[in-house]
């Protein structure tokens, strides 16, 4: 198989990968950079917008949404990044059509391009980066990553580099009921010795359009910032529409387990600024006054553990020259519940830190504390078997097709710890139906002392 060498390989083609390439070029425009992956990404689907944190209140809003589990020192650093983010927008040509407010935000600080901000930013970044002759794009499925040798395996090439940046996204698509597009879950193949943090911190988006397709269309939270209400079958409003996702999802689950249904009432919202939402309503012939919704897996706060330079942490310590960015990482940015529209911001911020430390040397102190939510998958042979099972079947086969299992899983991870839910979780582990889902349930039971 042909072997190609580069200075840096970035795995992924979403915002975090493209932004890493952008910031690397800002630091050293002579680097030979390769981006490898598939062009589809969750980044392209981002509707609501991107937070531009200009006020200190953003720190406290983020902390509050995270139930005070986010890393306050990191968030303060992010405020210092705001001028860089604005310069970047200027340079790539991103201008917001409006500034929005979403659940958990006290201010209108979300910069949006109608309801397709992610697509806009992804294509602007791509257009910027592709102009450099020393940047190569390899559009290909990635089948494995050898962290030790910084090699990336594709069906036709082996790509090798001095430095490796992992930016291949989160694992919400491992749930059958999700807003995420499916792509081969690379996380399983890059497991060897890597420390994962807080895998059970999954964000359920409260307002996916409940129309029984996979993935479910998302009704952006920005709708609630513009006057949408959450009502039950009788039209009774049951939760503050501007509460955070964790709380709103729990309130909807309460409605669902009582045998009722939850709806978004969009009658007060001007849908001209939400063309995607309008098209969903038209496609499924749904009236704007009574839009059926349900919580679904949307974003994964947990992921690969990194130090403050976003270098990957393994059982043996920090891996030399291996970095990670974007949704893939657990950095402490979101804690256990992400504040709306903070993830595109984390993509840019992590990409900036990665590029700076990769080119200029890191500033992080050695040694990373072991957290209560940390796990290492040491039994490589079992993982290999599971990887075979997972390989490129879309979506991943999962027990969670079953409505009962799905709701029990959501209740467990949203900390609705009734006896029935805990019994279900223990039975679920007994069945050993799905490696990744089992790891999530086991991590959660360990966290709450029920292992
Ligand atoms: C419907 C929806 C709406 C959202 N709205 C917002 C929003 O308004 N604001 C916000 O801040 N966040 C939003 N998010 C979350 C946000 O979009 C993501 O967290 C963020 O884009 C992640 O970026 P990333 O670059 O880390 O990963 P991704 O964008 O997921 O990119 C991962 C890349 O890796 C590639 N890849 C992965 N595995 C393989 C493989 N095996 N082989 C080849 N390639 C591979 C993928 O093809 C892709 O190119 C939304 C998410 C969804 C699903």
Image (cartoon, helix red, strand yellow):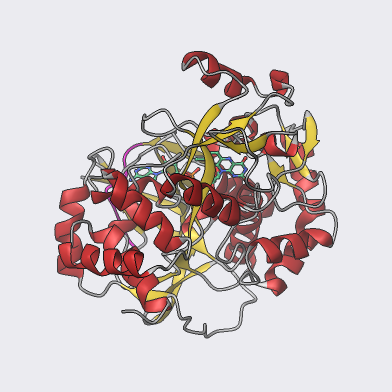
Q: Is 175 contained in the magenta span?
A: no
Residue 87 left/right relative to 220: right
The x and y percentages for residue 260 are 46, 40
Q: How many marks?
A: 0
178 vs 193, left or right, is: right
User: What range of the chain is rendered magenta?
Assistant: 140-146
Which residue reaches farthest front? 234
Q: Quadrant of the C terminus?
A: bottom left
In this view, the residue in front, 166 or 152, is 166
Q: Quadrant of the N terminus?
A: top left
Of residues 165 and 304, which is closer to you in this image?
304
Give the residue drawn at x 61%, y 66%: 357
Seen at 61% across and 33% down, the residue is: 235
Which percent across, then down, holds residue 77?
74, 67
Judged left or right of residue 257, residue 23 is: right
Vertical comparison of 36 with 27: above or below: above
Which quadrant of the figure has residue 191?
Answer: bottom left
The residue at 62%/55% (across/down) is 346
Can you tell which quarter of the image residue 79 is in? bottom right
Q: Nearer the viewer, residue 361 or 143?
A: 143
User: In the figure, 93 relative to 279: above or below?
Assistant: below
Is 198 rendered above or below residue 248?
Answer: below
Q: Name the residue nearer the viewer: 67 or 357.
A: 67
Residue 12: percent from left, percent from top:
45, 45
Question: Visible in this render: residue 158?
Answer: no
């Amino acid at each position: 198989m042909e072997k190609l060498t580069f200075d840096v390989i970035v795995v992924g083609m979403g915002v975090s990968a493209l932004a890493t390439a952008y910031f690397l070029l800002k630091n050293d425009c002579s680097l030979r950079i390769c981006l490898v992956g598939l062009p589809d990404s969750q980044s392209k689907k981002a509707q609501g917008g991107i937070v531009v944190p200009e006020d200190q209140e953003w720190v406290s809003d983020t902390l509050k949404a995270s139930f005070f589990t986010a890393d306050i020192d990191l968030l303060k650093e992010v405020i210092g990044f705001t001028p860089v983010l604005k310069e970047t927008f200027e340079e790539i040509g991103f201008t917001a059509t409006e500034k929005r407010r979403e659940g958990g935000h006290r201010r209108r600080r979300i910069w949006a391009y109608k309801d397709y901000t992610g697509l806009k930013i992804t294509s602007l970044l791509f257009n910027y980066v592709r102009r450099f002759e020393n940047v190569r794009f390899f559009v290909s499925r990635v089948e494995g990553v050898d962290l030790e040798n910084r090699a990336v395996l594709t069906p036709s090439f082996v790509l090798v580099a001095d430095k490796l940046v992992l930016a291949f996204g989160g694992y919400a698509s491992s749930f059958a009921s999700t807003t995420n597009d499916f792509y081969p879950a690379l996380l399983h193949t890059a497991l060897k010795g890597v420390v994962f943090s807080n895998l059970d911190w999954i964000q359920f988006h409260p307002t996916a359009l409940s129309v029984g397709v996979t993935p479910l269309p998302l009704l952006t939270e920005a709708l609630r910032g513009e006057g949408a209400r959450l009502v039950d079958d009788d039209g009774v409003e049951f939760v503050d529409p501007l509460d955070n996702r964790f709380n709103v999802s729990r309130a909807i689950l309460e409605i669902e387990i009582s045998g009722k249904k939850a709806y978004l009432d969009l009658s007060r919202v001007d849908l001209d600024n939400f063309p995607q939402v309008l098209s969903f309503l038209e496609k499924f012939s749904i009236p704007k006054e009574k839009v059926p919704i349900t919580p679904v897996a949307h974003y994964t706060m947990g992921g690969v553990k990194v130090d403050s330079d976003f270098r990957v942490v393994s059982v043996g310590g920090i891996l030399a020259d291996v970095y990670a960015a974007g949704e893939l990482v657990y950095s402490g940015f979101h804690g256990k519940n992400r504040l709306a529209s903070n993830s595109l911001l984390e993509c840019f911020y992590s990409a900036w830190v990665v590029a700076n430390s990769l080119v200029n040397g890191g500033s992080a102190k050695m040694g990373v504390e072991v957290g209560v939510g940390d796990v290492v998958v040491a039994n490589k042979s079992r993982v290999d078997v599971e990887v075979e099972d997972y390989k490129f079947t879309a979506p991943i086969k999962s027990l969670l097709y079953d409505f009962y299992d799905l709701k029990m899983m959501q209740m467990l991870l949203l900390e609705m710890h009734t006896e029935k839910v805990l019994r279900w979780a223990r039975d679920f582990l007994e069945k050993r139906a799905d490696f990744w889902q089992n790891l999530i349930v086991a991590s959660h039971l360990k966290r709450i002392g029920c292992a």
